[in-house]
Image (cartoon, helix red, strand yellow):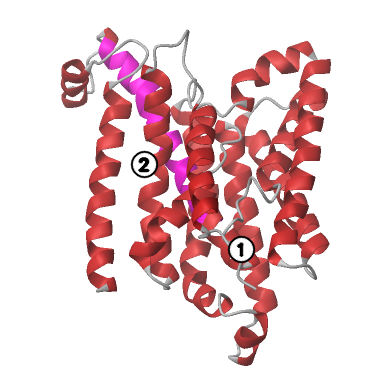
Amino acid sequence: MTHRRFGWGVAGLAVILLITVGASLAFGARGALLTAMLEALGSPGTRSPEAIVLWEQRVPRTLAGAMAGLALGLSGVFAQTMTRNRLADPGLLGVAPGAAFAVTAAVAWGGAVSLRSQMWIGLVGAGAVTVAVYLLGRRASPTRLVLAGVAVGSVFSGLSAAIALRDPDAFDRMRRWGAGALGGRAMADVAEFVPFAVVGVVVCILLARSLDILDLGHDPAQALGLPVGVVRGAATASVALLVGSATALVGPVSFVGLIVPHLVRPLAGARHTRLLGLTALAAPALVLGSDVIGRVLPTPGELPVGIVTALIGGGLLALLAGSGRWVART
């Protein structure tokens, strides 16, 4: 039965992902350009206004959203397994705010403007916060670990806001990025992100079976011969790599790593290979779908994707909390 549910889940999520990719390419603030986009896709060499919008704006934007969603979703699975807490999320654990603070400080004080430098700085910030939260909460219960992450994340979010407000130039440069935005990305930006994403995804694949054992708990996993320290270290590095680079690319986008594993876990069962596979389909679809919603809503300008995912994720989190499915595993 689980195998059948997984198969249907893969098929359904693949269709949803294709639909959101198509919608991301066809719909935007300028309205629906479906026919023109199909013509531009069929003739890459044309220089019509629609073709320029497609290849220079919407294709990079769609790729950035899909890859950032993939990174955030996979890091959410790792965070929840490492902490044995279904509330764990790169944002709630302070990882994403730490990466955002590092990038904001670098832009305001060091003038770091290239995406490559921002990604390395974001990795440093994400890694430092990941280690700090883990050290603070390693002897605490899973729920207290999340509380430690929320506290650390709140501090860094406040510091980021203070830096941006005190530096008008930095605030202007970071305004949309700070809300989590896919607009304005070029293919060169996406290409900078690819090596980080590839390394992070490969680590996820290599650790998938070890996560099945780690999910049993520290002592049982150690009794079964799993090098728990090595696995936790590699998983922590993977989370920092994925979250730091994704945050540098599109800004802090919340709730993706928290909500998506919850939604696909009933279809995946207990095996992390299946959970990671379904998450890799669902998380990009959530980010792209949220971006499309933000583009087509009748508001002045576009609504950044980070705001839309926060609205969707907050509502789903309230439902999960009410149902009791979020409860930490001890």
Q: Is residue 75 left or right of residue 49?
A: right
Q: Quadrant of residue 253?
A: top right
Q: Quadrant of residue 168?
A: top right
Any part of residue 297 in sight: yes
The residue type indicated by label 2 comes to: Ala
Q: Position of residue 212 (x, y in %)?
A: 50, 76
Looking at the figure, which quarter contains the N terminus?
A: bottom left
Question: How many residues crowd mark 1 within 10 Å: few (<14), some (14–19), many (20+)?
Answer: many
225, above or below 210, in the image = below
Element at label 2:
helix
Q: Position of residue 237 (x, y in %)?
A: 65, 59
180, above or below 259, in the image = above
Camera-nearest label, 1 or 2? 1
The residue type indicated by label 1 comes to: Asn
Residue positioned 38% across, 70% down in the render: 269
Q: Is residue 40 left or right of residue 317?
A: left
Element at label 1:
loop
Any part of residue 197 in sight: no
Residue positioned 41% across, 54% down in the render: 263
Residue positioned 62% across, 73% down in the render: 231
Structural distance between the alpha carbons of marks 1 and 2: 24 Å
Q: Residue furthest front?
A: 322
The residue at which mark 1 appears reads as 85
The residue at which mark 2 appears reads as 285
- Which region shows up in magenta? 50-75
Q: Which mark is residue 176?
A: none
Q: Sequence-wise, which precedes: disc 1 or disc 2?
A: 1
Q: Are marks 1 and 2 in contact (CB under 8 Å)?
A: no
Residue positioned 78% across, 46% down in the render: 151
Looking at the figure, which quarter contains the C terminus?
A: bottom right
